[in-house]
Amino acid sequence: RGVSNLLNVHAIEIYSLHVDCKVTSRFAHTVVTSKIVNRANESREATFEVELPKTAFITNFSMSIDGKVYPGIIKEKASAQKEYDTAVLRGQSAGLVKITGRKLEQFHMSVSIAAASKVTFELTYEELLKRQLGKFELLIKVRPRQLVKHFQIDVHIFEPQGIRFLETDSTFMTNELTEALTKVQNETKAHILFKPTVDQQKINPELDETLLNGDFVVRYDVKRGATAGDIQIVNGYFVHYFAPHEMPVFPKNVIFLIDRSGSMAGRKIEQTKAALLKILQDLRPEDHFSFITFNSRVAEWRSSLLQATAENMANAAGFVQTLSASGGTDINRALLTAVSVLDKAKRLPKSSVSMIILLTDGQPTSGESNVEVIQENIQKAVNGKYALFCLGFGFDVSYKFLEKMALSNGGIARRIYENADAALQLQGFYQEVATPILRKIEMQYPENAIEGLTKNNFKLFFEGSEIIVSGKISNELDLFFLPLQHASDLTLKEEANVKEKEQVFQNQSYIFGNFIERLWAYLTIQQLLEKSISAQAEDQKTLEAQALELSLRYSFVTPLTSMVVTKPADQQQTELANKPTEAGKWGIEHSFPVGGKCFLLFQWRISIIFSNAKRKKSSWWLFYRAKSVQCLGR
């Protein structure tokens, strides 16, 4: 959001910039409004840039030039592209949407405005905040690139469970700017206002340069009373949050599978070694672990898993420090060896969780190199027994390959960026999966009372995260009955009165009323897209068709939809931009003249997704049950 530094800052002036974010029970609805005036005596280009989270879906965009509104219309990507492809051959290329970092993607729009004219840009996007390591994080990128007369960030939070803690952070905050930040909070609501004056925005009183360049972050968590979780209901849709805490941690059996091929030489292998040394210190005494390294050959540090005693960890640290990189990449044999070690392991704790953490930076170049064969081999060998987590180091790796393999084997994939803090990224990922406290969780709801249930069974649950299940209530119900049954036959019950739950969200003037329905749609689309990654061709078509229907119905710009914006008729230009996903796929953006008008087509790609839903039969009561959940007794 802002204008190019190449332009005269006084000619194209952003006189108002407002970021308005409403967070209702983790679901964030953000509207960015930028008002620009051309103070030059000739036409100039006004630019609107917004950096938004990769996990967000754009839901609306419009620009208003001298009172005339040019709205964005969301269409099926295939039909939109077919409609306009005949004109793509003309014009220049320019980027509209691109990845700008680990967490952010940038939306960019430029339009020419006449002398003394004004333009208002407005972009709306929505996201479901994900709980990691015990907190939710809302990230707002601030980069106006000039002083703004009316600059304001509003964040409203409403959490019926109660706000346990709330903090703000910023990469650009100074003592003067701190005075422009206010925070009002009670039991369930918070309002954060950041409204700096022009003088407070200045780097130096003598210079018209802005301090506002960086991240504005809000972090918080909610209070958790009910053991069986919290149910919230609005307009016939429910969402169920489940995040038990203070529970015993399962012992882990971890194999660290480390790529030491030639491409890992230099800073990558040194950062990997630094991260592994820190991770070793975080192992618990009851954990078991081992290392397998691979290039063209596969080498086991030990023939079996070792308990995390002080002596064994000291020996492991010595081994890690000797790691060097050379040769090719035999991912297939390395993974099969890791599975074999777990299969043959003896004297492991009876109630423990076994996992493989793979770190690689390249493609399979030695041994089996067909990624589909490798995926099939690994899925057959793992057979649901272990969780596989795949970390892709840098951009030479086939992320799509790693993502499909992880999702097919109960884990997730993550990209590690080749920056100075790569070791911290590796440690941060390990911390997320270091404390498994539940496994084989299945939440059951009555089929005759619920429609469109999102994913309701989970292989593992880690301390500090959160399970979210949503659906539509199809019958008139008075009570939610919430038993939580453990493997030890311990049953915990909670009741939730439907009408009382609906009353919670009455008269909340700053909360958008249908948020649970939109949360349900967002979550369902994400899970359908994730499930399609590892599905067979026919199933993939069905899943994508379901996701497309929801994307269009709820106006989400997803990998399956495009937004078309009609620009003023006198601006005949063609723009072509590539939009990568984390997996390296590209969306195409075009604008081109059609019938005397310029149509701007941009497509959005989202990379963080979840898996699909199942529905289970139950009784008339609407309840969930953690079926055959395995956890440690107290």
Image (cartoon, grey):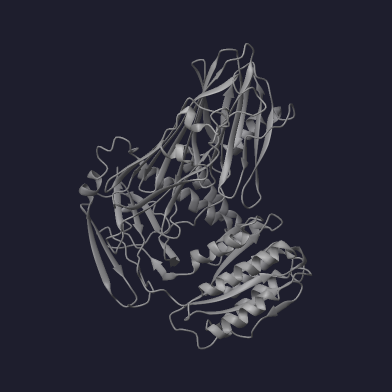
Q: Is residue 604 visible?
A: no
Measured as percent of width and height from the top left, residue 12 is found at 59, 21
Which residue occupies the extreme front position in the image? 206
Residue at 64 percent of width and 33 percent of height: 82
Measured as percent of width and height from the top left, residue 107 is found at 58, 36
Name the residue nearer the viewer: 208 or 568: 208
Q: Is residue 446 visible?
A: yes
Q: Is residue 282 above or below residue 186?
A: below
With 275 as the anchor, is 368 left or right in this view? right
Name the residue nearer the viewer: 586 or 219: 219
Residue at 44 percent of width and 64 percent of height: 458
Q: Is residue 201 above or below residue 596?
A: below
Q: Is residue 165 above or below residue 575?
A: below
Residue at 52 percent of width and 53 percent of height: 609
Which quadrant of the figure contains the N terminus? top right
Which residue occupies the extreme bottom position in the image? 347
With 611 as the anchor, is 587 left or right in this view? right
Name the residue nearer the viewer: 537 or 506: 506
Name the residue nearer the viewer: 530 or 616: 530
Which quadrant of the figure contains the C terminus? bottom left
Which residue occupies the extreme right position in the image? 327
Measured as percent of width and height from the top left, residue 614 is found at 42, 59
Q: Quadrant of residue 467?
A: bottom left
- Label total for image: 0
Measured as percent of width and height from the top left, residue 519 is found at 40, 46
